[in-house]
Amino acid sequence: MGDMHNSDTSSAEPDLGLLSPSMRFAFFGAGLIAVSFGLARFAFGLFVPSIRDDMGLDPRWVGLIGALPLISFVLASLVASEIAHRLGARNATVLASGFAVVGLGLISQASNVFLLGAGVFICGISTGLMMPALAAAMQALVDRSVHGRVSSIMNAGTSIGVAVAVPMALFLAGVWRGAYLSFAILAAVGLIASFYFIPAVSRVMPGDAAPPPAVSLTQLWRLLWLSTFAFTMGLISAAFWVFAPDLAVTLGALSPSQSAWLWLGVGIAGLGGAAITDLADRNNPPIMHALMLALLSASLVLLAASPGQILIAVFSALVFGLAYMSLTGLYLLTGIRLLPGRLSLGPVLPFLACALGQAVGSPLIGLLVEQLGYADAFSTFAAFGIVVALLSPLYPKYIEEALSEEEIAEQENLTGIQAAYDYQLLNEDGQPIHFDSPEEQAVEETENEGK
């Protein structure tokens, strides 16, 4: 790593504790992600049993509606980076929160399937806009030495949001409109807070940072494999996200309030996804991918086999949550590493592929449920997941094999979540730009004062 020292554009402070500016931003961002991803996007499956009974929907309609927020997420993601650049982080975040308020509010008042579909579609727009807006703010505000930590905390917001939906479902069992109205109020609070706490800035680049190199054919090929794996994982996971609680209610005779515990399991286990992602990056990503995808597939079979056993059903949710969040984190990290210097593109491609897979998988699992029943439909998706897991040796590598002895000795320091962000900015010699951490800056200032 290069030894030049550049001043960061963020307000670096020596304190890296929970109350440092970087950590305050991380937890605030996690809260916004919890609303836009956890509540506006993934909470829908939790309320499917109540919505289905109230509106008289068959599985095919449920699958089609479940695909709408994924389609709008993809469409919004295509323009989200440009919107964040033109509007600035504050306005882009407020816009994303505004879509969440409108979408969640519309769902709470939906009197027919078309208004319900419009609401979930608008919620998907919020999801697609939120992360790029927060990424723009992070680039400008957060010390670069803790980008990995801040990103991990914000990504955990999805699991937090999924878990937060559970008490709503328990206290408002059968009253799904009241739950969604509560979600809309939380989104409105986030909107107001974003206006006051997110600055009106766009991403700031150091003046001595070299433009990223042209994308090579090797990178394109590896991105294609990464997107293929992300697409298939998204397709397989759609079965659980959309129909898991409904399966437990229909086959297992559990009450809607009991099925809510599945989402609590997903949320709690998902918090461990960041640790698994970091572990995978430091060891063998293909092996970890195979293991996590096999676990995700196993969770579908486990739920389908014993839907009436609440403990087994919750355990399947724990397995699913850990596997899903680990895989999405791994795809994110691989995308960043495959396209260094292109944070607006590298992590976006696998997320788009995953969302497209879920958009295809949602109506497909709905059709299979209608034709084959829940157990056979879930087993079919699980079998497909096992086949894809066996292809994991083809998972793209992002650390080149031709390393010098010095690079091999330092390879352990080149892996992990923070290292992926460290290698996003290169100087004209192609070496990573080094930024003093707040702790290093404090030591350096103390030494200078003593001279």
Image: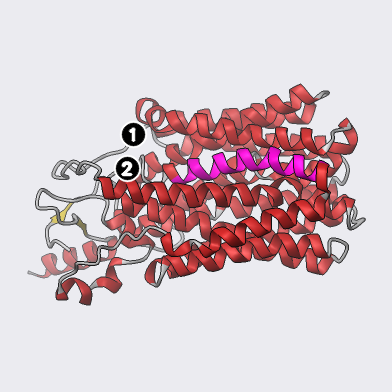
Q: Position of residue 257 (x, y in %)?
A: 86, 53
Which residue matches tag 1? 202
Q: Is residue 433 left or right of residue 261?
A: left
Picture residue at 67% right of the left edge, 58% below the top: 382
Instruction: Locate the N terminus by quadrant.
Output: bottom left
Which residue matches tag 2? 140
Q: Position of residue 273 (x, y in %)?
A: 54, 62
The stretch of residues the image draws in magenta is 350-370
Q: Position of residue 143 (x, y in %)?
A: 31, 53
SS type, badge 2 = helix
Picture residue at 81% right of the left edge, 55% below the top: 375
Instruction: Residue 340: tell me if it is visible.
Output: no
Tag 1: residue type? Answer: Ser
Count neighbours of disc 1 (C-alpha within 10 A) and say few if under 14, some if 14 to 19, many if 20 or more. many
Find residue 92 and report its image quarter: top left
Q: Earlier in the sequence, mark 1 or mark 2?
A: 2
